[in-house]
Image (cartoon, rainbow, N blue to C red):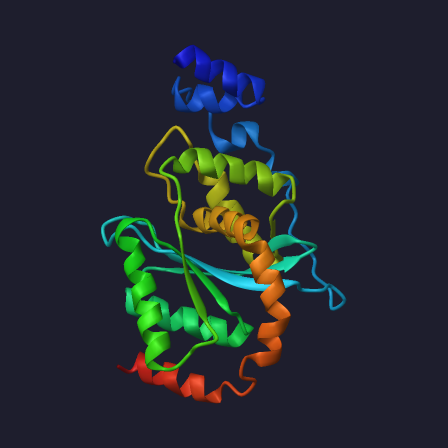
Amino acid sequence: SLKEEYENDRSLGKLDIFMAEVQNDPEGKTKSFLDLESIRPLELTAGDLCLGNYIVIDPATSKQTPDVVAINYFEIYNHIPVSIEILAKKQTSFQTCVDVLKLAEEKRCKFIFVESNGYQYELCTWLEHICTLHNLTHIEIVPFYSTKNKTQRLIKFFYSWIANEIRTTHRTHTLVKSQATAFDFTKTDNIDDIIDSMDMGLRVCRDHREAIISEYLDFLNTAPTDTSYLTVQIEQLTSF
């Protein structure tokens, strides 16, 4: 079994992954085989055409872990997801809902994707309940599921980031790069909330790009332009 795994990783040019995950090679840190310094933030201009937008949420694991809730707002340019804004902090599910709805209002964003493995699905329930309560029918809450092998997923994300299959901006680049540089895939206690939300944003775009793009213009034309009523409702939620 080990030999088969070795040959498979070697044939894919990913022998470093095998050495790190199976052989526990201490040199198998992100910075030892990935040139993160070569990645540059995307410079957006007024002439760039946004094809769609969406929000992803990576809920924190628990109060005891150093992970925080990561809310990542993406826009799509040239069919590539671009991280525009990241909110990352330790907070309750209720406050997360408030922050996400504020962001969705500000960015006129229809789709909110929530990592929903296990108990994390509860955040979908919170958001759906609040949207129903306040008749926010133009917002769609979508549960999103991840595989258990997080390390493998994040390594694939790093390669995709280097290949410009997903981009950061000046506003988000330092946050992502800092966490990516510190990531050690020989360990299981990495702080990875932000890079996990980046990986999720990439997979969401791959799986749902058609729907996000096709509904974007329709949403801009049909969604309420005067959102002052929503601002009042969110303020009421905050003081609840």
- Residue 1 in the figure: left or right of residue 171: left
Query: Which residue corresponds to the image point at 49% horizontal and 35% vertical from the top-left?
Result: 155
Q: Residue at x 48, y 75 (%)?
A: 138
Residue 91 appears in view: no
Q: Quadrant where the C terminus lies? A: bottom left
Which residue is at the far left?
A: 64
Which of the 4 image quarters holds residue 96?
Answer: bottom left
> Is 198 on the left-hand or right-hand side of 169?
left
- Quarter of the rendering containing residue 63: bottom left
Could one spot residue 151 in this view of the protein? yes
The residue positioned farthest toward the right in the image shown? 47
Instruction: Return the x and y of residue 37 as percentages of the image width and height.
Output: 62, 39
Q: Position of residue 172 (x, y in %)?
A: 55, 56
Pick the residue in front: 235 or 75.
75
- Count of number-bearing discs: 0
Residue 205 percent coordinates (x, y): 55, 52
For the N terminus, give its image quadrant: top left
| Rendered view: 65 above or below 56 | above
Going 65% across and 44% down the picture, which residue do you hit?
164
Q: Nearer the viewer, residue 94 or 217?
A: 217
Residue 6, horizontal then vertical, whole percent = 47, 15
**In this view, which residue lies farthest toward the top?**
3
As displayed, is residue 82 above or below residue 216? above
